[in-house]
Image (cartoon, helix red, strand yellow):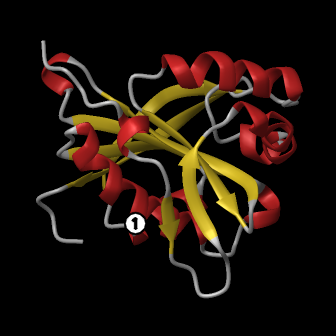
């Protein structure tokens, strides 16, 4: 058995540089429930995420996430805060057994904050900070067919598209491809 470090204990806050906005990544708190429900309650957010991310997203969904999902996570799950308000989330779910050196990245941002260069900066800083804490050599993400904005974020952060998982998922009754992106930490930035 290979123990993992406690990510929340070793990663309190991360300031993210942006030319105009004050951005930070921090642990989720129970008091975030109302702000989380407000930021997440958009069909345009849920359409690019797994079905376990509900829409509509209400206060009970936020409380369940903060009270059950975050504490049970084997990886790192953090809030993205912009100008002092919850604006999204980011996390890495590490693999297990022989895959323990790789982790799957997931993130979302509330639509009113789209197009401001926020997630590109957050992802870059987050993976650089969290990969060593989690003992990862590789971080990967699966992006649903059609989500070009997320593909651009990953490409701008040094991820390479490794391939397409054809007919890999079903979302709203539609079978879609998943584009697999990865960044290895012996790769140049």
Q: Which of the two residues, 110 or 169, is positioned nearer the viewer here?
A: 110
User: Is there any visible trace of residue 52 in the rendered image?
Assistant: no
- Where residue 33 sits: x, y (%)? 80, 34
Residue at 13% of width from left, 19% of height from top? 2
Q: Quadrant of residue 185?
A: bottom left
**In-image side of 167 versus 58 (left or right):** left
- Where residue 128 sits: x, y (%)? 31, 59
Residue 78, relative to residue 17: is it above or below?
above
> What crowding class fits label 1: few (fewer than 14 Cα within 10 Å), some (14-19), or many (20 or more)?
some
SS class, disc 1: helix
Residue at 20% of width from left, 27% of height from top? 100
Residue 184, relative to residue 8: is it above or below?
below
Residue at 24% of width from left, 19% of height from top? 96
User: Is there any visible trace of residue 189 in the rendered image?
Assistant: yes
**Residue linked to disc 1:** 155
**In-image side of 141 versus 112 (left or right):** left
**In-image side of 9 versus 87 (left or right):** left
Quadrant in the picture for the N terminus: top left
């Amino acid at each position: 058995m290979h123990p993992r470090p406690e990510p929340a204990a070793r990663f309190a806050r991360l300031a993210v540089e942006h030319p105009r906005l004050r951005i930070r990544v921090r642990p989720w708190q129970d008091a975030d429930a109302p702000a989380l429900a407000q930021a997440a309650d958009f069909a345009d957010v849920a359409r690019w995420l797994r079905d376990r991310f509900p829409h509509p997203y209400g206060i009970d969904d936020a409380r369940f996430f903060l009270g059950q999902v975050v504490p049970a996570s084997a990886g790192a799950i953090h809030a993205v805060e912009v100008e002092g308000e919850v604006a999204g989330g980011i996390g890495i779910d590490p693999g297990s057994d022989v895959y323990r050196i790789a982790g799957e990245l997931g993130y979302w941002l509330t639509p009113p904050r789209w197009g401001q260069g926020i997630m590109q900066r957050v992802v870059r800083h987050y993976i650089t900070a969290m990969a060593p804490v989690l003992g990862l050599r590789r971080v990967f993400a699966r992006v649903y067919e059609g989500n070009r904005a997320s593909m651009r974020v990953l490409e701008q952060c040094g991820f390479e598209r490794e391939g397409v998982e054809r007919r890999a998922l079903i979302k709203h009754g539609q079978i879609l491809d998943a584009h697999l992106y990865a960044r290895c930490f012996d790769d140049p930035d």
